[in-house]
Image: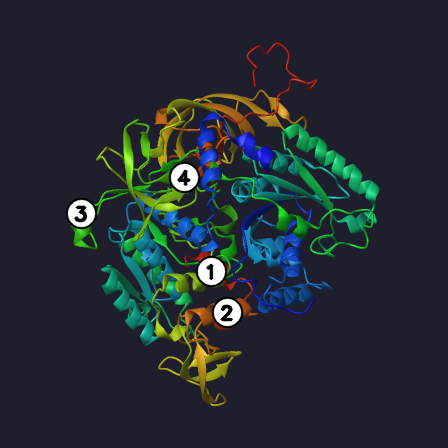
């Protein structure tokens, strides 16, 4: 192991959130360990602990996967069960890294790690090519509209650094990515174990002239920019201190606290409250004791309005132009993460922004077949299925199309009985159609997705 | 990049794009601003969803940052929940004094659960090694039950320790206070779901994504007052297990250990008997930021004897209901 090291630079340019994906044993945790190690993000006591455990197990080199497989059960089984979050930085930028599990039974954890990612690094074992979990994770990545996908064709050392194998696996991945609607997936031949093309270019793949994994991560543009969308802010709380104000001057203060989900809002602008449709004007924007002229996507602020209109938690304050029409009927694609299957007629809670409403499943209109990569009819959705559903809501909610706004188009389904989150939902998303696939069911005239 | 923007710009969004280009102001949150905003989002959401939250407050730097964030989240209203401290009976006196001052300054209600009370009446027994960190779990869970707290904010961070690196921001505890790391809920986008059955509760870690350097950079930026022992000072210490332990009522040197006066500071503050000081000349927040950024040891690796007991010491404590 190389000489160590110091903690990451104090601050670096922009923050990039990345998540790993891919089938079990494709080497995700080893790759993450390699990235952390080669960016000198592993502190000496952490590395010493990993080296000690590796030695006790009879390994000749440190098992870098142990840097993120922190749970006892993970170390026992040599697998990743849940997402590990790690932080590292280079001179170019800072990274939040979510190392996700590969086993199908832990798909919900992979969805968790990918839902906030700017880039997914999908690992594929060069010897095995595309497996069912590779397809599932790529489908999830496509649905979540993760802005970037990098395909790390791993264990290239075990196929004698063969360009032919790399090209074959890459072609296979590109085909699947294309069918799922992933716009771009850059492939890199790597050995996570030895570090080839991870942080340093490899002399053992002379036929590969592209960037290293780290080099690519450092230069990716953060494609998802909610600041450019129209202004929305779900109201989390009404701040009304009255007699409890920390200062007598604020006894009559009334503000609406929330995080700006998208766009920009300025003092003096007219806004509309959803779902009520009442209009008012922004009188002030507060962030703690600071007063701001404007607030933009990502900022947690408190808005004051010129009129005392009825606004409560769960409402959305939006720009007047282009505000969404609240609706009680939505079509969405869901990743079903509940242990018991989802059935038509089932009642659940739906959480969108800061609003939670009751909902009933009207129909299940299909599920993604991971072999053929298109929707097939399905009566129910089982754990880890991706399906198209129609929902009826107990009250109007200002949802947006997920393809327009990740914040405005995403929701949770919650089991009211035990409070568990049972699905990730994307409003208006669609599944690849069976239009040009030979297996389209005959005589199903209603089949319109 | 441009293709993506065009993709995402439908008719109703055009005005915004034009405006952003006209003003050409960079509207990008700095790392600290993004972390602050995420923490405030989480704190507000839990207060919006739950009936009786509370915040774990030890007087340590992470819980002080939590209080600072909570004050911002609700300003100009007061922080709408009490703070809970599990007192091991081995705390640094200056930290307890700081705790009380801070509670007074912010007008908070303080609930204290005393490990010493449990030892005195026999509900807990002192461990042979005298360490009391693991003994905090029972008083903590009792206090949560007695006060019917349904959401408990903690200052835990994922960079501290490998079991914490695995935990959700909103983390369910069963009726025995146990964490089940193999069966955590999905946590999607920035939609947080703290719902649970009666008898269960959630632990909430709004600064999960902060690193030690982030915490110090934030303390410096916001000029947050801390307990004095975080800054370099002269102290009588002795060497044990590679750490400098303070001489005090609960930590006395053995015969083979010599007491020396050193210039030290604390990177973490916990139980006096097992929290080590580090040699350091750093007397200001700015000096500490530089020192922490250059450190080759994690803060717990450098200063916590109890985490050295086994590979999974933290996970085992957390499963039983620890912080």
Note whether B257 is above or below A227 in the view shown: below
Expressed as whole percent of the image width and height from the top left, the position of residue B295 reads 54, 70
Left or right: residue B7 versus residue A186 is left
Distance, label 2 to label 4, CA atoms, is: 35 Å
Q: Which mark is residue A98?
A: none
Expressed as whole percent of the image width and height from the top left, the position of residue A230 reads 43, 33
**Are discs 1 and 2 both within one chain?**
yes
Note whether A24 is above or below A177 in the view shown: below
Q: Secondary structure at mark 1?
A: helix
Q: Residue at x 38, y 53 (%)?
A: B176
**Considering the image in quadrants, where does the N terminus of chain B appear?**
top right
For mark 1, what is the residue?
B214
For mark 4, what is the residue?
A264
Could you tell me which chain the residue with mark 3 belongs to?
A
Q: Residue at x 46, y 45 (%)?
A: B25
Distance, label 3 to label 2, CA atoms, is: 43 Å
Residues marked 4 and 1 touching at CB (< 8 Å): no
Whichever of labels 1 and 2 marks the residue nearer the N terminus, that label is 1
Q: Which marked residue is nearer to the observer: mark 1 or mark 2?
A: 2
Q: Quadrant of residue A439?
A: top right
Residues marked 3 and 2 touching at CB (< 8 Å): no
For mark 2, what is the residue?
B290
Q: Secondary structure at mark 3?
A: helix
Q: Residues within 10 Å of mark 4 (few under 14, many from 20)?
A: many
Q: Secondary structure at mark 2?
A: helix
Note whether B253 is above or below B183 in the view shown: below
Q: Residues within 10 Å of mark 2 (few under 14, many from 20)?
A: some
Note whether A403 is above or below B262 in the view shown: above
Q: Which mark is residue A242?
A: 3
**Considering the image in quadrants, where does the C terminus of chain B appear?**
bottom left
């Amino acid at each position: 192991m190389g000489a160590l090291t110091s903690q990451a630079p104090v601050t670096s340019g922009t923050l990039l959130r990345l998540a790993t994906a891919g089938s079990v044993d494709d080497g995700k945790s080893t790759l993450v360990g390699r990235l952390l190690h080669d960016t000198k993000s592993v502190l000496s006591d952490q590395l010493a602990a990993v080296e000690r455990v590796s030695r006790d197990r009879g390994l000749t080199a440190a098992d870098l996967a142990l840097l993120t497989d922190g749970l006892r059960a993970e170390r026992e089984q040599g697998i990743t069960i849940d997402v590990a979050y790690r932080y590292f930085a280079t001179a170019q930028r800072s990274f939040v890294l979510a190392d996700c599990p590969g086993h199908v039974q832990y798909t919900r954890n992979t969805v968790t790690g990918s839902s906030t990612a700017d880039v997914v690094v999908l690992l594929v074992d060069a010897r095995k090519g595309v497996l069912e979990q590779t397809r599932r994770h790529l489908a999830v990545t496509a649905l979540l509209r993760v802005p970037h996908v990098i395909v790390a064709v791993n264990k290239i050392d075990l196929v004698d650094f063969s360009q032919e194998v790399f090209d074959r696996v890459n072609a296979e991945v590109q085909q699947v990515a294309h069918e799922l609607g992933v716009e771009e997936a850059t492939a890199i031949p790597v050995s996570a174990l030895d570090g080839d093309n991870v942080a340093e270019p490899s002399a053992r793949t002379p036929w590969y002239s592209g960037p290293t994994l780290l080099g690519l991560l450092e230069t990716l543009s953060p494609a998802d920019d909610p600041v450019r969308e129209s202004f929305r802010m779900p109201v989390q709380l009404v701040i009304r201190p009255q007699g409890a104000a920390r200062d007598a001057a604020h006894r009559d203060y009334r503000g609406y606290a929330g995080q700006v989900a998208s766009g920009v809002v300025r003092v003096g602008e007219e806004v509309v409250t959803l779902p009520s449709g009442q209009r008012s004007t922004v009188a002030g924007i507060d962030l703690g004791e600071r007063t701001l002229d404007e607030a933009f996507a990502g900022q947690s602020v408190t808005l004051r309005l010129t009129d005392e209109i009825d606004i409560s938690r769960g409402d959305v304050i939006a720009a007047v132009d282009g505000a969404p029409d609240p609706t009680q009927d939505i079509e969405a694609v869901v990743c079903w993460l509940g242990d018991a299957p989802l059935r038509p007629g089932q009642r659940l809670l739906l959480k969108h922004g800061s609003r939670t409403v009751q909902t009933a499943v009207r129909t299940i209109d299909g599920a993604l077949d991971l072999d053929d990569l298109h929707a097939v009819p399905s009566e129910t959705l089982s754990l880890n299925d991706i399906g198209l559903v129609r929902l009826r809501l107990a009250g109007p909610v200002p949802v947006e199309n997920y393809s327009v706004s990740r914040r405005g188009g995403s929701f949770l389904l919650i089991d009211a009985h035990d409070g568990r989150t049972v699905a990730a939902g994307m409003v208006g998303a669609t599944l690849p159609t069976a239009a040009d696939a030979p297996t389209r069911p005959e005589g199903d005239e209603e089949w319109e997705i | 990049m441009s293709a993506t923007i065009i993709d995402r710009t439908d008719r109703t969004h055009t005005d915004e794009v034009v405006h952003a280009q006209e003003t050409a102001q960079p509207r990008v949150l700095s790392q600290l601003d993004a972390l602050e905003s995420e923490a405030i989002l989480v704190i507000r959401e839990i207060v919006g969803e739950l009936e009786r939250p509370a915040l774990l407050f030890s007087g340590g730097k992470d819980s002080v940052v939590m209080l600072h964030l909570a004050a911002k989240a609700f300003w100009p209203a007061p922080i709408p929940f009490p703070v809970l401290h599990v007192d091991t009976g081995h705390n640094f006196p200056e930290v307890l004094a700081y705790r009380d001052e801070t509670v007074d300054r912010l007008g908070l209600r303080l609930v204290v659960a005393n490990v010493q009370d449990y030892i005195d009446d026999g509900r807990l027994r002192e461990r042979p090694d005298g360490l009391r960190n693991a003994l905090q779990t029972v008083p903590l869970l009792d206090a949560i039950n007695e006060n019917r707290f349904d959401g408990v904010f903690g200052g835990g961070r994922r960079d501290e320790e490998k079991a914490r690196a695995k935990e959700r921001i909103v983390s369910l505890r069963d009726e025995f206070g146990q964490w089940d790391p193999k069966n955590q809920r999905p946590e999607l986008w920035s939609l947080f779901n703290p719902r649970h059955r009666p008898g269960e509760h959630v632990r909430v870690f709004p600064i999960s994504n902060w690193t030690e350097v982030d915490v110090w950079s934030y303390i410096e930026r916001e000029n947050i007052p801390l307990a004095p022992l975080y800054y370099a000072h002269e102290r009588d210490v002795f060497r044990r297990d590679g750490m400098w332990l303070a001489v005090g009522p609960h930590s006395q040197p053995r015969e083979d250990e010599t007491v020396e006066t050193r210039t030290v500071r604390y990177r973490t503050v916990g139980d006096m008997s097992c929290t080590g000081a580090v040699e350091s000349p750093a007397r200001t927040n700015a000096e500490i930021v530089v020192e922490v950024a250059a450190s080759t040891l994690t803060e717990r690796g450098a200063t916590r004897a109890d985490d050295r007991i086994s590979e999974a010491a933290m996970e085992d404590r957390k499963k039983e209901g620890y912080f």
